[in-house]
């Protein structure tokens, strides 16, 4: 595997930004705390508050972090950043992004199907979803006959932690590895997270949450995803309710409830399971699967299992008609695992008798998940896909610069006060940052009265040097109000 420096794929195309502005798409904007000296650390994570911030994370590889391989072919962190989602995000407009390709995954893994080579630009970080939702996300990358991508909200993660993240009514179409949350994970923890929606298209490995998981821990997670998958290759293609391929990994206290349709004519060469497809050197404990509808080549928990321990895990054999836990097994230890009737699957004692925690972890509510067990602390999806926003009167506002793109000067306008606040003077600072988050110019720093104001930036840094072409961010801060906008210098 070739791990590339993420900086090499940061391509600035000013024409694209103009296209986005003309057609009304949300443009990428950095978080409100982008300019803080310690932004992106565990103590002050980048705040992902809206779709513009999420797009910024998607399109700014320099904040994905970086790893390198040591002499033992193990990954070591070179740089790592932290992120925290602070609100529900409605991503419905992503269906129109990038000429129909939708949202571009955070982190990338690309496979050349002719040479067999791959290139990887991993996300190396911590993403805390804050128990908020990302709704209506659409991902459908363009793939050629000789190059395929890993597909999901995160394309590829290494040495990462993803927690409290909930995807609602998402749609992911096609990819070498496909998963709602991640296409491919390596040495990653997925905690208290889940997804609902649909995953479809051609693939090598697909799961409701993760396409391929290596050395990954999945705990307290759920998949309410329908899978309609077609094989990319005749051999070794796997699908699963939660994970496609599970290698040197573990799943605990998690469940799948949805459909799994394998549409390939080569079904005898594929494997699909209610929890995972191919499972190798892994452990599964306290999980269940409900396959409400599916093709004939789907098994209760997994397809092909090798060196696997499975404890206290069950599936609904009545609604699915699935009688077997797995397609094939080699050195597998089963303990207290079986297919059950629908009534038994909706009865708490079925699970407590197997040691499941129905005090703090699980519960059964007839109004949720069709009466099957749910994770106790999972939040309900937003009624309208995003919270209603109460608009409060502002006492400051940052306006878009003009012209944009520009060379060599642009005017930045801002206002202080509004109809409710007519006489207040406020201390205003406006700073300019490059895409690395480095402050290059303190443009405004003083007290301004009520009214409109403007200032010209001449494309120079604080030390008087002309900066290079590229994307720059300008941030206004009044103490109570912070806003960031983007501009392009094009020489």
Image (spheres, helix red, strand yellow):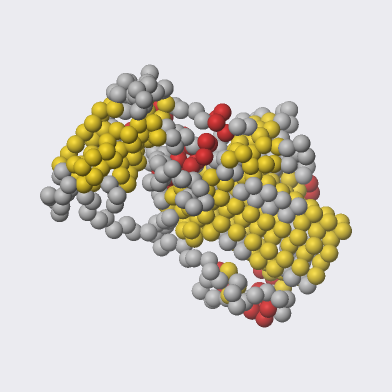
Q: What is the quadrant of the N terminus in the image?
A: top right
Q: Position of residue 415 (x, y in %)?
A: 20, 41
Taking the view exactly as shown, the residue that stands out farthest to the left is 423
Quadrant in the rendering for residue 76: top right
Q: Position of residue 28 (x, y in %)?
A: 41, 39
Quadrant in the rendering for residue 14: top left
Q: Is residue 115 left or right of residue 329?
A: left
Residue pictured at 73% horizontal, 28% vertical: 115
Q: What is the quadrant of the C terminus in the image?
A: top left
Quadrant in the rendering for residue 334: bottom right
Residue pictured at 41% horizontal, 51% vertical: 49
Q: Position of residue 289 (x, y in %)?
A: 67, 64
Depth check, front residue: 352 or 367: 352
Q: Is residue 376 left or right of residue 239?
A: left
Seen in the picture, residue 436 relative to 91 is either above or below; the reply is above
Regarding residue 202, the answer to whether it shows in the image is: no
Residue pictured at 21% horizontal, 50% vertical: 395
Depth check, front residue: 84 or 37: 37
């Amino acid at each position: 595997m070739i791990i590339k420096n993420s900086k090499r794929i940061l391509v600035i195309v000013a024409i694209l930004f103009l296209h986005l502005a003309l057609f009304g798409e949300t443009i990428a904007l950095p978080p409100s705390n982008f300019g803080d000296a310690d932004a992106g650390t565990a103590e002050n994570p980048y705040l992902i508050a809206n779709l513009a911030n999420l797009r910024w994370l998607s399109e700014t590889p320099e904040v994905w972090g970086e790893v390198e391989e040591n002499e033992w072919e193990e990954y070591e962190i070179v740089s790592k950043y932290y992120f925290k989602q602070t609100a529900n995000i409605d991503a419905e407009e992503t269906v129109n992004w990038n000429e129909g390709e939708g949202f571009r995954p955070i982190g990338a893994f690309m496979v050349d199907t002719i040479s067999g080579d791959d290139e990887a630009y991993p996300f190396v970080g911590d993403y805390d979803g804050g128990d908020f939702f990302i709704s209506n996300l659409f991902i459908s990358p363009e793939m050629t006959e000789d190059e395929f991508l890993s597909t999901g909200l995160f394309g590829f993660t290494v040495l990462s932690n993803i927690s409290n993240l909930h995807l609602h009514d998402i749609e992911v179409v096609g990819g070498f590895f496909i998963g709602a949350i991640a296409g491919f994970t390596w040495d990653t923890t997925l905690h208290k997270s889940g997804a609902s929606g649909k995953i479809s298209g051609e693939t090598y490995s697909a799961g409701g949450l993760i396409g391929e998981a290596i050395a990954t821990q999945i705990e307290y997670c759920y998949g309410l995803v329908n899978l309609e998958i077609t094989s990319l290759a005749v051999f070794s293609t796997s699908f699963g309710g939660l994970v496609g391929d599970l290698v040197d990994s573990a799943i605990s206290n998690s469940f799948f409830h949805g459909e799994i349709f394998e549409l390939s004519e080569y079904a005898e060469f594929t494997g699909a399971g209610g929890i995972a497809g191919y499972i190798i050197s892994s452990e599964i404990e306290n999980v269940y699967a409900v396959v409400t509808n599916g093709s004939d080549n789907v098994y209760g928990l997994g397809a092909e299992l090798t060196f696997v321990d499975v404890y206290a895990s069950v599936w609904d054999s009545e609604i699915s008609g699935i009688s077997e836990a797995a397609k094939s097994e080699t050195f597998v230890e089963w303990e207290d695992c079986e297919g059950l009737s629908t009534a038994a699957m909706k009865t708490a004692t079925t699970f407590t008798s197997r040691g499941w925690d129905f005090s703090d972890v699980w519960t059964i509510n007839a109004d949720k998940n069709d009466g099957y067990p749910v994770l106790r602390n999972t939040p309900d999806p937003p009624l309208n896909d995003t919270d209603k926003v109460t608009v409060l009167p502002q006492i400051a506002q940052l306006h878009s610069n003009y012209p944009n793109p520009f060379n060599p000067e642009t005017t930045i306008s801002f206002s202080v006060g509004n109809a409710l606040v007519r006489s207040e003077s406020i201390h205003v600072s406006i700073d300019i940052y490059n895409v690395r988050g480095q402050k290059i110019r303190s443009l405004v720093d003083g007290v301004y009265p009520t009214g409109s104001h403007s200032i010209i930036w001449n494309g120079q840094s604080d030390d008087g040097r002309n900066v290079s072409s590229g994307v720059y961010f300008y941030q206004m801060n009044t103490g109570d109000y912070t806003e960031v906008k983007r501009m392009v210098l094009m020489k």
